[in-house]
Amino acid sequence: MNATELKNIEIIRREGLDALSKRLGSAGMVTFIRLFDSGDGDYSKERRELVDETAKEDILNFLRGENDKP
């Protein structure tokens, strides 16, 4: 990325924050920005571990209504 692109991105960022602040107020702007927080951790790894720990038969029984939870 060159200096012109960085400057343009900075202008867009600044004007975007200004527009959000004017339209939503400071608290609304912060709330809006938090909606796009990517979080942390590795969702795919955590999901794989959860699924691996759950027996297929437990899942089928749950779907049949034979268990309270998988």
Image (tube, rainbow, N blue to C red):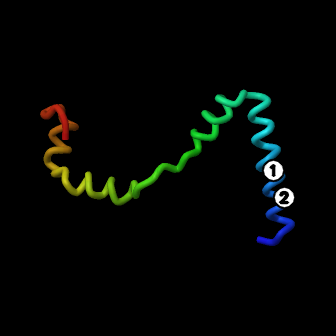
Q: Is residue 56 above or below residue 4?
A: above
Question: Can you give x and y, in whole percent of width and height, for residue 65 in the image?
Answer: 18, 31
**Cβ atoms under marks 2 and 1 closer than 8 Å:** yes
Distance CA(mark 2)–CA(mark 1): 6 Å
Q: What element carries label 2?
A: helix
Q: Residue at x 32, y 55 (%)?
A: 46
Q: Residues within 10 Å of mark 1 (few under 14, many from 20)?
A: few
In the figure, is residue 31 to the left or right of 10? left
Q: Which residue is drawn at 20% across and 44% down?
A: 59
Q: In this view, does 7 lie above or below 39?
A: below
Relative to the observer, which residue lies in front, 40 or 62? 40
Question: Can you give x and y, in whole percent of width and height, for residue 54 in the image?
Answer: 19, 50
In this rendering, the count of numbered labels is 2
Q: What residue type is labelled 1?
A: Ile
Q: What residue type is labelled 2?
A: Asn
Relative to the observer, which residue lies in front, 37 or 21? 21
Name the residue that disc number 1 marks. 12
For the C terminus, give its image quadrant.
Answer: top left
Question: Can you give x and y, in whole percent of width and height, for residue 2 in the image?
Answer: 81, 72
Quick one: which residue is furthest to the bottom in this view? 2
Question: Can you give x and y, in whole percent of width and height, for residue 24 in the image?
Answer: 72, 28
Name the residue that disc number 2 marks. 8
In the figure, is residue 34 to the left or right of 42? right
Label disc, if present, on residue 25 of the rendered structure: none
Q: How crowded is mark 2: few (under 14 residues within 10 Å), some or many (20 or more)?
A: few
Task: Please tell me in which quadrant of the rendered image residue 69 appears.
Answer: top left
Quick one: which residue is furthest to the front in this view? 26
Q: Is residue 62 above or below residue 24?
A: below
Relative to the observer, which residue lies in front, 1 or 54? 1
Q: Which residue is drawn at 34% across and 60% down?
A: 45
Q: Residue at x 83, y 69 (%)?
A: 3
